[in-house]
């Protein structure tokens, strides 16, 4: 019986597209938890409305040390957006599913399809930052911080890439797949 539970738990573990290294995930999670211990850090980061503002905060440089391969925009976005997450590190749902999963049967998706499409159409870092922060606020900060960081890192990688990316391999595709396979189906008359 414990084997079944173990398999089920392993099956539900989130899949990370960019944060594949377990040690890096642990360090990033430890950094996120420590935000509450640094006087005013979380509140200061929460007031940042764009990556350029978060880049001026010392906590962003801790993120840069953990994620050495990420751009400064990605590290700044991670620092600023993750400061809005209150809990949820045990939540195994990927971000796309979390945005679509109703709180109760028959309820609409917490993040509307219109807002979801705005997130997918983000054209630059300030726009992406704003849309992602809005998504976290709609979820009342109840989301896995590593899942959010993974999305930010994927967006960073794709925004810098100049080559064609097959639709099934892009961030927009896997977020859409998560969202639309979880969102309540519209009622037909």
Image (cartoon, helix red, strand yellow):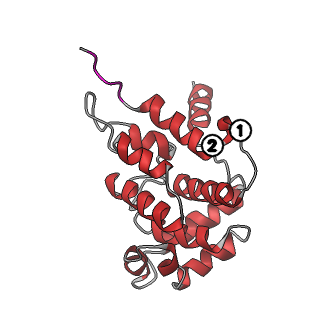
Asked whether residue 35 is drawn in magenta, I would say: no
Please indicate whether residue 45 sits to the left or right of residue 112 in the image. right
Residue 161: name its quadrant. bottom right
Which residue is denoted by mark 1 in the rendering? 166
Residue 186 percent across, percent down from the top left: 32, 24
User: Where is 146 relative to 115, above or below?
Assistant: below
Residue 71: name its quadrant. bottom right
- Residue at 62%, 43% in the rendered image: 15
Gap between marks 1 and 2 measured at Cα: 19 Å
Residue 15's mark?
Answer: 2
Circle 1: is it few (<14), some (14-19), or many (20+) Cα within 10 Å?
few
Residue 68's mark?
Answer: none
Residue 117 percent across, percent down from the top left: 43, 45
Q: Quadrant of the C terminus?
A: top left
Which residues make up the magenta segment? 184-188
Residue 34 percent across, percent down from the top left: 50, 74
């Amino acid at each position: 019986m414990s084997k079944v539970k173990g398999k089920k738990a392993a099956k539900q573990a989130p899949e990370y597209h960019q944060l594949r290294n377990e040690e890096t995930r642990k360090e990033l999670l430890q950094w996120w938890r420590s935000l509450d211990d640094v006087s005013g850090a979380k509140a200061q980061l929460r007031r940042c409305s764009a990556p350029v503002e978060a880049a001026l905060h010392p906590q962003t440089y801790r993120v840069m040390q953990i994620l050495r391969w990420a751009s400064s925009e990605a590290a700044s976005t991670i620092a600023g957006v993750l400061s809005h997450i209150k809990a949820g590190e045990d939540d195994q749902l990927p971000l796309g599913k979390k945005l679509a999963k109703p709180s109760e049967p028959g309820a609409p998706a917490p993040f509307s399809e219109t807002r979801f499409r705005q997130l997918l159409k983000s054209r630059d870092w300030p726009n992406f930052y704003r849309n992602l922060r809005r998504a976290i606020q709609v979820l009342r900060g109840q989301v896995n911080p590593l899942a959010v960081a993974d999305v930010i890192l994927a967006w960073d990688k794709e925004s810098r890439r100049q080559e064609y990316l097959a639709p099934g391999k892009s961030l927009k595709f896997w977020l859409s797949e998560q969202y639309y396979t979880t969102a309540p189906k519209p009622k037909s008359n």
